[in-house]
Image (tube, grey):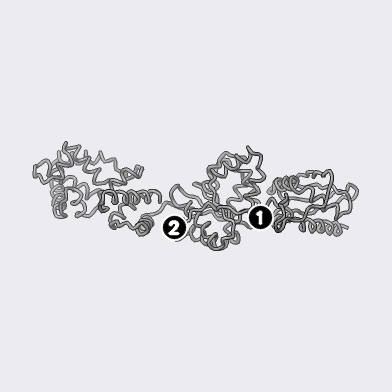
Amino acid sequence: MQKSHQELWDRCLHLIRQNVTEQIYKTWFEPIVFESYDEQLSTVLVQVPSPYIYEYLEQYYVRLMAWALNNSFKANVKLTYRLVVDRENGKKVDMEGERPADIDAPAATTRGNQSPTVLDAAVPQELNPQLDPRNTFESFIEGDSNKLPRTVGINIAQHPGKSMFNPFFVFGPSGCGKTHLINAIGVECKRLDPRRRVLYVSARLFQVQYTDAVRRNTTNDFINFYQTIDVLIVDDIQEWANSPRTLDTFFHIFDHLFRLGKQIVLASDRPPVDLEGVKDRLLTRFSCGLIAELEKPNIQLCIDILNSKCRHDGLKIPADVIQFIAQTANDSVRDLEGVVNSLMAYSIVYNTSVDMHLAERIIKRAVKTDNHPLTIDDILEAVCRHYGVTQQNVFSKSRKREYVQVRQVSMYLAQKYTKMPASRIGQLIGGRDHSTVLHSCTAVQQRLKVDQAFKDDISSIENSFKLKQ
């Protein structure tokens, strides 16, 4: 007897399938599970995987379902839903379906140049993927700190939704390349299959769109649009912290896309476990694919990034300057790019070559951090202040004893704290050669052994540097 009821339900689904698009059928009707038919009450009980599907069916397809049920079971059938409200604990609730006043056969599915009907509401339209075409895998320089996320990203782009890396959750500090990487995934997906519906969206824009949809009473349209995406990329999701309505809405979108095998890529400045205000049901979904950390770039990766940018921008920067920038502006890739852009601007405007002195000046002004290595400018400023002379005095050709002493102390401290070659130190302190620097360092070292007052002067200058070793 149960088998015949199942057959009647299968016939009902067949009638529905003939009157909607294949995508709509798979999205909204295929997940329904037939449970039982009560002949005395003329009631069909079906199970649906979430309250959202129940609400959507009741809002858009109640007439179609009633028509199909009555034609299959040959009776005025009443529909009851069993909703899975807590999958982990197996909690379910039953909800009665609405019975339409009168039921007519639905219009045929929209085809050709026929006017669209409500049954075609979920047919996807063209969309702008909102991707930055410059952020590709080719421009995402590989290093030890990003090798795993980059390799996984390429695999996802080649097989979106078909690997074990779904969802792909990337986290790391600001400026480590998260936005570049997730953009690269989207760009490569579109390159391999231009028909694929790929969308990059920031968490903030998503929230603004959702808020606007609530205000306009178009929330279902908003959700329906996002549920048509093949590859959904959301950046900075930590901004949804303590936004429960946005998170609940995204949960339904996530659940729908994940169930259909669509690819989801998420980026955050922290791992899922540290996201505030996110319910466990969403955290477990964030964590069920792959969580990958993008770390702050190391020195070698910074050098590789700088060399790549110089080649791309046609800028010539000496190797020692590249090394210095990589060591001092390595908190983020953005800092590196900002320094190179500033060097390029100065080089063009003042028609000058890029050297260490210019790099030091730019980094001191452009990169805000408390752990800069000491620069020649820092040393000269401290020494000149201590002895009451100007830098112009130090750079001059004067052989006055006080100027020579300041010059020698500056060269000694520069070699001690900057680890620059003697030739570079000499160039930056008055245009002297490397032999002058070596002689100055030797003279200072010898004097420190026999002159306690001079030794106290050097200690006082060093204490003013505010070094962070």
Mark 2 crowd level (few <14, some 14–19, many ≥20, 10 Å Cα): some
Q: Which of the 4 quarters of the picture holds residue 393?
A: top left
Residue shown at 21%/38% (left/top)?
460
| Residue 270 place in picture, x, y as percent | 50, 47
Q: Is residue 300 visible?
A: no
All told, the count of numbered labels is: 2
Marks 1/2 in contact by CB < 8 Å: the verdict is no
Q: CA distance from mark 1 to mark 2?
A: 31 Å
Decide which of tag 1 and tag 2 comes sooner along the chain.
2
Q: Is residue 259 above or below residue 395?
A: below
Query: Any mark on residue 259, and which?
Result: 1
| Residue 124 place in picture, x, y as percent | 64, 54
Q: Quadrant of the N terminus?
A: bottom right
Query: Any mark on residue 242, and which?
Result: none
Q: Is residue 100 left or right of residue 426?
A: right
Q: Is residue 28 left or right of residue 150?
A: right
Q: Regarding mark 2 in the picture, which secondary structure is present there?
A: loop
Q: Amino acid at mark 1?
A: Arg
| Residue 238 place in picture, x, y as percent | 53, 44
Identify the residue position indicated by label 2 in the image: 140
Q: Which residue is the extreme one toward the front? A: 113
| Residue 354 place in picture, x, y as percent | 27, 53
Camera-side residue: 78 or 163? Answer: 78
Q: Regarding mark 1 in the picture, which secondary structure is present there?
A: helix
Q: Is residue 275 visible?
A: yes
